[in-house]
Amino acid sequence: MVKTRNHPPRGRHGNVKLVLVEDVQYLGKQGDLVEVRPGYARNFLLPRGYAMVPTEHNLRLLDRYKIKVRQAKEARVADLRALGEQISKMAGITIEANVNPEGHLYGSVGEQEIAKGLRAKNLPVDPEMVRMEGGHIKETGLFEVPLNLGYEIETKVKVLVIAQQK
């Protein structure tokens, strides 16, 4: 069989050897040399840009790509640390909700409402970052809610739930 430039190298049992450009669940991490079935490589990994043929040129490109990804990750972590410090220094947020005469909410205050209150103060927090450990808030008062900003950066925000003014 004549080996051409466009065909990836073959491993044992006729499988194709590829280098992963991105992390692929159940297969490997970025930069790993993996051996997969030809159809999986041809129909999924290569068209979507998850892997490439391990040539010298592609390996150099992958090294440059890894450096860019690492720098972007470091910048994102620095931004999240600054966001965490900014959140911990602020007084907190106030959320108005409909309550009955005993002080219980008709609904509840959850991740969406807390994230919306933080975004109103120009703090980019997603609802997935809010960790409601004891469930949603169902009564008025002052609560301390933990936030997980990602990359193991955690902070807490004070949430004051008050009765809505009529």
Image (spheres, helix red, strand yellow):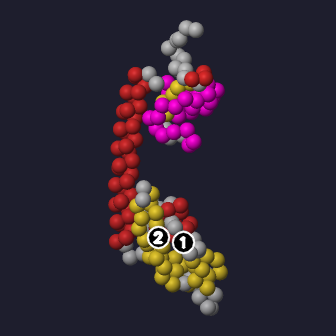
Sequence order check, earlier mark of 2 and 1 = 1
Q: Quadrant of residue 166?
A: bottom right
Q: Vertical placement of 22 versus 104: above or below? A: above
Q: Which residues are magenta?
A: 25-53
Position in image of residue 125 (x %, y %)? 47, 62
Position in image of residue 141 (x %, y %)? 51, 84
In the rendered image, is residue 96 in sight?
Answer: yes
Residue at the disc numbered 1: 133
Asked if the magenta segment contains residue 50, the reply would be yes
Q: Kindly report the distance in space between the C-alpha atoms of the residues bearing marks 2 and 1.
A: 8 Å
Q: Residues within 10 Å of mark 2 (few under 14, many from 20)?
A: some
Question: Which amino acid type is marked by label 2?
Answer: Pro
Callouts 2 and 1 close, C-beta under 8 Å: yes
Q: Vertical placement of 7 versus 90: above or below? A: above
Q: Relative to residue 44, is residue 160 drawn left or right?
A: left
Question: Which amino acid type is marked by label 1?
Answer: Glu
Image quarter hosting the N terminus: top right
Q: Nearer the viewer, residue 101 or 11?
A: 11
Residue at the disc numbered 2: 146
Asked if the magenta segment contains residue 15, the reply would be no
Going 45% across and 57% down the picture, which residue do you hit? 150
In the rendered image, is residue 51 in sight?
Answer: no
Secondary structure, mark 1, is: loop
